[in-house]
Amino acid sequence: MASAPEHTIAPESPVLKYKRKLNLSGRLGRSDRSHLAVWFWELDRVLLTFIFVLMAIGLIAVAAASPATAQRLSDATTTLNPLLYFYKQLIWLILGIPVMLFVSMLPKTQARRLAIILCAVFLFLLLLVPLIGTSVNGARRWIGYGLTIQPSEFLKPVFAVTLAWILSWKAKDPTMPVVGLSIILTGTIGILLMMQPNLGATIIFCGIWFVLILLAGLSAQIIGLSIAGGLGGLVLAYFFYPVATQRINTWIFGGGEYDQVAFAHRTLTSGGFIGKGPGMGTEKFKLPEAHTDYIFSVIGEEFGLLACAAIAVVFFAIIVRVLMRLLDEEDVFTIMAVTGLTTQLGGQAIINMAVNLQLFPSKGMTLPFISYGGSSIIALCLGTGLLLALTRRNPYLNRSSYAKDGFQMNGQKGGQMSGEPE
């Protein structure tokens, strides 16, 4: 019986080889018009790199702080893994990064619509916190059973975008009561946060509101009244809000042996300029929240003040990079929304670092992307995704003579094209 003939694969022709090579080289290239390629070229990759740098620093910092927190929360029956919070932080980042990248791919209109919808959702959840919220360390800020979320963390970035959307109405119709609407929205959130209590988040929301009304070009009278109202609110909070009274008194007069801010400052400076080395810190074991509020001090002890300065430079670079992206922006909403998101990120970082440096009273506020926290990380990834979506630009648009001619044609009065005789 004759054997069946063997089947051989015909060699690939030079033309097919060239086409396959051309297709591979065209992916994510300038000639690739797929959604992924367009997103890649429009995305601010420098800004994204800075964010990834913060995430990497955060993993190292949480790994350094995790043993202190694990030891503090262990008891006679349960001993926590020293790197428990590092593993959890890694999981939150694995979940958060896809959220950030997905949101950054949305067109501006869809990103704005998503932020407005989420603002309504998380504002509703914030209303439910006093009713069905979960208390931790005397504060009722979380909602849910088993897996809890902190609505105020998610509300911060979407509030900034929604507030920018409301204030941008003024450019279309100066008669619209945008200031009153913004005051009602911000005031409602502030009252709900003070009930938790959450003084730090209240300051962030009010700070976003103040920066955006400045940017909206409102009258000096309204701005002056806002400043006076803010100062008056701080005075009233000191006299009638026990949380503010206790924290301000501790900051001004000292809290003795159990002063958290004093512990943080002592830990921060104990490492000198270059630090004691990874895992060699001892003062961190005295901190109440080494992995969250006071992680900046842990970094100072183990990696030195130079490492702390480098982190501050990264945050400053992010702010400068965003402002550079806004130099050629003409859309009022985009300018205000990006400014609001940057105010939230930068303001939170400044307050956290100032608390650790004993320049601010304790606020219970995390350092963005560096402190441990599930709600914090996912919410920050959401906000960064919105920031990346709103700062996307076509890098070749202004270099194209066709694009310039198109803008000139569309800009003629009465729809007359550039170069046409009148």
Image (cartoon, rainbow, N blue to C red):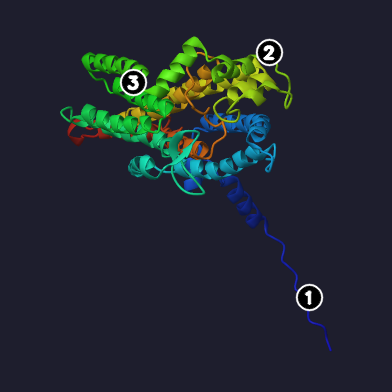
Q: Looking at the image, tell me whether mark 2 or mark 1 is earlier in sequence order.
A: 1
**Which amino acid, mark 3?**
Phe
> Considering only vertical position in the picture, is 209 above or below 115?
above
Q: Quadrant of the C terminus?
A: top left
Q: Which percent across, then down, holds residue 280?
A: 74, 24
Q: Nearer the viewer, mark 2 or mark 1?
A: 2
**Which amino acid, mark 2?**
Gly
Judged from the image, the secondary structure of the residue bearing numbered disc 3 is: helix
Q: Which percent across, then down, holds residue 375?
A: 49, 39
Q: Which image quarter: residue 271?
A: top right
Residue indicated by mark 3: 240
Whether residue 271 is visible, yes or no, is yes
Residue indicated by mark 2: 272
Q: Nearer the viewer, residue 213 or 128?
A: 128
Q: Which percent across, then down, holds residue 9?
A: 73, 67
Residue indicated by mark 1: 6
Q: Looking at the image, which residue sits at the far top?
A: 253
Judged from the image, the secondary structure of the residue bearing numbered disc 2 is: loop
Whether residue 122 is visible, yes or no, is no
| Residue 70 falls left or right of residue 359 | right
Q: Gap between marks 2 and 3, in whole Å?
A: 40 Å
Q: Looking at the image, which residue sits at the far right?
A: 1
Q: Looking at the image, tell me whether mark 3 or mark 1 is earlier in sequence order.
A: 1
- The residue located at (69%, 60%) in the rendering is 12
Q: Residues within 10 Å of mark 2 (few under 14, many from 20)?
A: some
Q: Residues within 10 Å of mark 3 (few under 14, many from 20)?
A: few
Q: Quadrant of the N terminus?
A: bottom right
Q: Gap between marks 2 and 1, in whole Å?
A: 75 Å
Q: Nearer the viewer, residue 230 or 25?
A: 230
